[in-house]
Image (cartoon, rainbow, N blue to C red):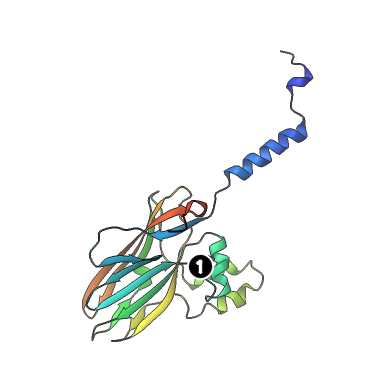
């Protein structure tokens, strides 16, 4: 069927529509906020999830571009790529050793995403194509949980847990630290979070 030329969009105008449509569909940055959930020994404060009992206090704070300035530059590069990065502080309140193996930790989301923490090898492959990648990785030494961490009685450890990005349409996430040893006893820590589009967060959140 023949259509008069006025029924056809000029090629330049069509390209403009496609360009604007692509921009509109681009995912907006998301941030993690601790969820207020009734769990044993769990509470929240500002943007931090807290586990606390008589022998152990652990805080999990998701990093963002706003609160990551004191951390190595690679952290900010990872955040730009939407890698979730948690600042984990472990305080040993007992008279026994606390042992944390990051291999038994995981981050899940409500789109069936499951991921383990990134280790040194994972970060190496991430930075090898970056300008100055070797230096970026070198500055991360001792700043993230890569190997088993032992915290002596009365001691404290403050490092990062880094994961691959969450699933695109996920709205909830859970950080789980399994088999944290306090002496011979094990504790499982669960930190629930909400994944919220940054532009939709109110100033009071």
Query: What residue occupies the far front of the structure in this picture?
Result: 204
The answer to whether residue 146 is seen in the rendering is no
Q: In the rendered image, which quarter is residue 100 located in? A: bottom left
Q: Position of residue 35 (x, y in %)?
A: 35, 58
Task: Decide if residue 28 is on the left or right side of residue 34.
Answer: right
Q: In the rendered image, which quarter is residue 131 located in? A: bottom right
Front-most of residues 64 and 102: 64
Residue at x 77%, y 30% (from the top left corner): 10
Q: Position of residue 117 (x, y in %)?
A: 43, 66
Residue at x 32%, y 58% (from the top left corner): 36
Residue at x 23%, y 81% (from the top left corner): 183
Task: Decide if residue 117 is on the left or right side of residue 68.
Answer: left
The answer to whether residue 187 is seen in the rendering is yes
Q: Position of residue 51 (x, y in %)?
A: 29, 70
Residue at x 30%, y 86% (from the top left corner): 154
Query: What residue occupies the far top of the structure in this picture?
Result: 1
The quarter in which the N terminus is drawn is top right
Q: Position of residue 55 (x, y in %)?
A: 24, 79
Q: Residues within 10 Å of mark 1 (few under 14, many from 20)?
A: few
Task: Decide if residue 130 is on the left or right side of residue 13.
Answer: left
Q: Which residue is mark 1?
A: 122
The quarter in which the C terminus is drawn is bottom left
């Amino acid at each position: 069927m023949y259509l008069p030329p006025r029924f056809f969009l000029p090629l330049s105008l069509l390209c403009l529509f496609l360009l604007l449509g692509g921009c509109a569909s681009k995912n907006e940055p998301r941030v993690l906020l601790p969820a207020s959930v009734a769990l044993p020994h769990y509470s929240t404060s500002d943007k931090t999830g807290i586990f606390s009992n008589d022998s152990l206090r652990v805080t999990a704070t998701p990093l963002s571009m706003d609160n990551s300035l004191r951390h190595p530059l690679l952290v900010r590069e990872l955040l730009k790529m939407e890698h979730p990065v948690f600042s984990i502080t472990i305080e040993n309140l007992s008279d026994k050793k606390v042992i944390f193996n990051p291999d038994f930790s995981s981050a899940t989301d409500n789109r069936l995403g499951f991921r383990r923490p990134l280790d040194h090898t994972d970060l190496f492959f991430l930075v090898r194509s970056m300008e100055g990648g070797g230096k970026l990785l070198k500055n991360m030494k001792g700043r993230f949980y890569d190997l088993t961490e032992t915290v002596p009685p009365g001691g404290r450890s403050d490092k990062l847990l880094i994961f691959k990005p969450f699933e695109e349409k996920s709205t909830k996430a859970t950080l789980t630290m399994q088999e944290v040893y306090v002496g011979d006893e094990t504790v499982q820590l669960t930190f629930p979070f909400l994944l919220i589009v940054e532009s939709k967060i109110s100033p009071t959140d």
